[in-house]
Structures are given as C-alpha cells and as structure tokens.
Image (cartoon, helix red, strand yellow):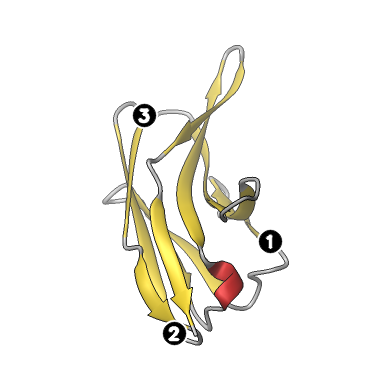
C-alpha cells in the first residue's frame, strides 16, 4: 500500500484547508483510513479515522472543525480543516490499516506540512 498526501500549506488562523491522500497498491483488506499529525517537538497524534462501515472518530481537539471523507472511486481520503488554529500547525500524515492474517498493519504517507499563521 502506498499513500501520497498533498494539500498542505500556509494558512491564516481561522482559515480552511483540504488535505488529500491518494492510496494505491493492494488495497484489499484495508479496514481503516485516517489522519494523524505531528507538531514540532511532540509525538504523532491521532486526528480522525473512518472505517469500512463509515464509522468516524475524531480527536477532541478537532471535533466540529475537521471533517474526514473518503472517495472510494478514486481511492482517496480527504481531511477538510476549517477554523484553523495556531496549534494545528504540524506535519499531517495519512494512515491506512490493513488486516493481515498476523494482525493489523499500519501504512503511512510521507506527510504534508500545514502551517497556521496569526
């Protein structure tokens, strides 16, 4: 599974941005698609995920501001971010979880940088 994230950039506080992640390769048995982020000096943290039943989870810090969506035809997952805050500045990574006979396997994209300015 290969994941290619795009859409990051510089945005003012209060603005919006949409991140996209294109998935390719053997996508069979992908159970979950999601987004994580890593701010400077901090650990990578969960942001949002969607599973095959379209069940969605968000981190409390982004609820009501971020929306995750999936385009099953184009094999893409998007993260719509609005009302961005300075603390949203981070490298954002898309994630795919594939169910293997030995257990779930995580795949990661290369990351896309989001910088929120005042």
Disc nearer the start of the sequence (2/3): 3
Q: Is residue 58 left or right of residue 88?
A: right
Q: Residue at x 47, y 29 (%)?
A: 29
Q: Pointer 1: residues within 10 angstroms few (<14), some, or many (20+)?
A: few
Q: Secondary structure at mark 2?
A: loop
Is residue 106 depicted above or below 10 in this figure?
above
Quadrant containing the N terminus in the rendered view:
top left
**63 is higher (above) or lower (below) than 69:** below
For label 2, the crowd category at 10 Å Cα-Cα, with few meaning under 14, some 14 to 19 and many 20 or more, is some
In percent of width and height, residue 51 lies at 56, 47
The tag on residue 59 is 1
Classify 10 Å Cα crowding around label 3: few (below 14), some (14-19), many (20 and above).
some
Cα separation, mark 1 vs mark 3, equals 25 Å
Residue furthest to the right? 60
Q: CA distance from mark 2 to mark 1?
A: 19 Å
- First-in-chain label (2 vs 1): 2
- Which percent across, then down, holds residue 22? 30, 47
Q: Nearer the viewer, residue 44 or 23?
A: 44
Is there a contact, CB below 8 Å, between mark 2 and mark 1? no
Is label 2 or label 3 in front? Answer: 2
Quarter of the figure with residue 87: bottom right
Q: Nearer the viewer, residue 33 or 94?
A: 94
Q: Position of residue 65 (x, y in %)?
A: 58, 77
Q: Which mark is residue 1?
A: 3
Residue carrying label 2: 15
Residue at horizontal 36%, vertical 73%? 10
Name which residue lies at 58% across and 13% down.
Answer: 101
Q: CA distance from mark 2 to mark 3?
A: 32 Å
Q: Nearer the viewer, mark 2 or mark 1?
A: 2
- In this rendering, would 1 be left or right of 30? left
């Amino acid at each position: 599974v290969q994941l290619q994230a795009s859409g990051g950039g510089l945005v003012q506080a209060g603005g919006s941005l949409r991140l996209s992640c294109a998935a390719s390769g053997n996508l069979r048995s992908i159970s979950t698609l999601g987004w994580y982020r890593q701010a400077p000096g901090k650990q990578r943290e969960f942001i949002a995920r969607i599973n095959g039943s379209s069940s969605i989870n968000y981190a409390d810090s982004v609820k009501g501001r971020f929306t995750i969506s999936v385009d099953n035809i184009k094999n893409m997952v998007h993260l719509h971010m609005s009302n961005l805050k300075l603390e949203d500045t981070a490298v954002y990574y898309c994630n795919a979880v594939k169910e293997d006979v030995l257990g779930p396997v995580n795949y990661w994209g290369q990351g896309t940088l989001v910088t929120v300015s005042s």
